[in-house]
Image (cartoon, helix red, strand yellow):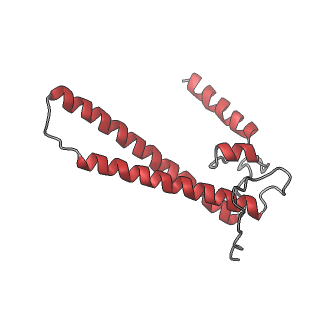
Amino acid sequence: MPNKVVELPEGYKPSEKEQYMCPEHLEYFRQKLLKWRQDLIEESQATINNLRGEVRDVGDEAERASRETENSLELRTRDRYRKLLGKIDQALARVDDGSYGYCEETGEEIGLARLEARPIATLCLDAQERWELKQKQMRDSR
């Protein structure tokens, strides 16, 4: 079933007074995710252009070492962006299938404030805290 096109008024923000994940909420978060995705792609492209534009055989050893460290940081940032783009794409798929905004573990509402702060969130706060505690316990037991 094709999604109905939802026009959002300028400056629209989801409200607790509206039904949770109504079409307006979903469209708002779709647009937010798409903009974030586009910004990351543009930043990533700038990083690639930056790396390509460098002349590699100039400068002394200290300058080359400094440049390699910068390049390494840029490549790590690019890898983080790549992973983030994957999470954004997964969130967009959840918007399309209607599961966006609901905890993958409990099925409860994630909440507008949490999604506003972290639009790729897949867990409600309680489930996220349990997950983080479990991760900490696993690290501590090593």
Q: Is residue 59 visible?
A: yes
Q: Residue at x 24, y 48 (%)?
A: 53
Quadrant showing the C terminus? top right
Q: Residue furthest bottom?
A: 1
Where residue 136 sits: x, y (%)? Answer: 61, 27
33 up-or-down from 117: above or below = below
- Quarter where residue 11 is shown: bottom right
Task: Count the labels in the image.
Answer: 0
Q: Residue furthest front?
A: 10
Q: Is residue 66 found left or right of 20 in the rendered image?
A: left
Residue nearer the viewer, 142 or 105: 105
Residue nearer the viewer, 133 or 17: 17
Where residue 77 sits: x, y (%)? Answer: 42, 41
Q: Residue furthest right?
A: 17
Where residue 114 sits: x, y (%)? Answer: 71, 43
Residue nearer the viewer, 75 or 50: 50
Q: Is residue 118 found left or right of 61 in the rendered image?
A: right
Q: Is residue 89 visible?
A: no
Q: Residue at x 59, y 55 (%)?
A: 33
- Quarter where residue 31 is shown: bottom right
Residue nearer the viewer, 91 or 129: 91
Q: Is residue 29 found left or right of 43 in the rendered image?
A: right
Where residue 30 sits: x, y (%)? Answer: 64, 60
Q: Residue at x 33, y 50 (%)?
A: 48
Quadrant showing the N terminus? bottom right
